[in-house]
């Protein structure tokens, strides 16, 4: 199974906050896996030097984001 690196992006500045490695059977499977997890922040999926996809945060996933990653709107 191919290995992928998931980069969690900071919603305030777009920089990488953290990364994790995981594996999936193919690109479609890893994209589906990330969508199901609902990280609450944008995720970039990479396989080596190849960018596979960027999954933007959804309002539903934002409830799972740590408080420090959420931005208050006034």
Image (cartoon, grey):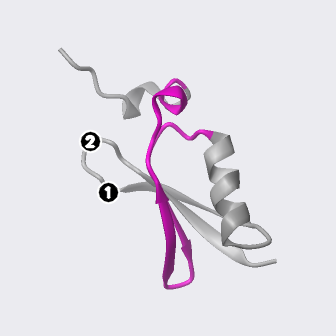
| Residue 32 place in picture, x, y as percent | 68, 54
Residue in view at x 56 percent, y 28 percent: 64
Which mark identifies residue 15? 1
* Magenta stretch encompasses residue 42: yes
| Residue 47 place in picture, x, y as percent | 59, 78
Which mark identifies residue 25? none
Left or right placement of residue 71 versus residue 6 in this view: left
Is the N terminus in the top left, top right, bottom left or bottom right quadrant? bottom right
| Residue 51 place in picture, x, y as percent | 48, 75
Of all residues, the one furthest to the front in this rendering is 28
Above/below status of 6 relative to 57 = below
Residue under label 2: 12
Is the C terminus in the top left, top right, bottom left or bottom right quadrant? top left
Above/below status of 64 relative to 50 = above
Of all residues, the one furthest to the left in this rendering is 74
* Magenta stretch encompasses residue 6: no
SS at circle 2? loop
| Residue 43 place in picture, x, y as percent | 48, 54
Left or right placement of residue 64 versus residue 9 in this view: right
SS at circle 1? loop
Callout 1: 10 Å neighbours few (<14), some, many (20+)?
A: few
Badges 1 and 2: C-beta atoms under 8 Å apart?
Answer: no
Q: Which residues are magenta?
A: 38-63
Residue in view at x 47 percent, y 36 percent: 58
Callout 2: 10 Å neighbours few (<14), some, many (20+)?
A: few
Q: Quadrant of residue 57?
A: top left
Q: Quadrant of residue 41?
A: top left
Residue sitting nearer the eye, 43 or 29: 29
Above/below status of 34 relative to 40 = below
Left or right placement of residue 16 versus residue 29 in this view: left
């Amino acid at each position: 199974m191919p290995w992928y690196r998931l980069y969690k992006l900071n919603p305030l500045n777009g920089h990488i906050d953290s990364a994790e490695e995981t594996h999936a059977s193919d690109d479609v499977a890893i994209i589906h896996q990330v969508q199901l997890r609902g990280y609450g922040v944008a995720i970039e999926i990479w396989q080596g030097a190849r960018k596979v996809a960027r999954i933007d945060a959804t309002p539903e996933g934002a409830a799972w984001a740590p408080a420090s990653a959420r931005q208050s709107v006034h």
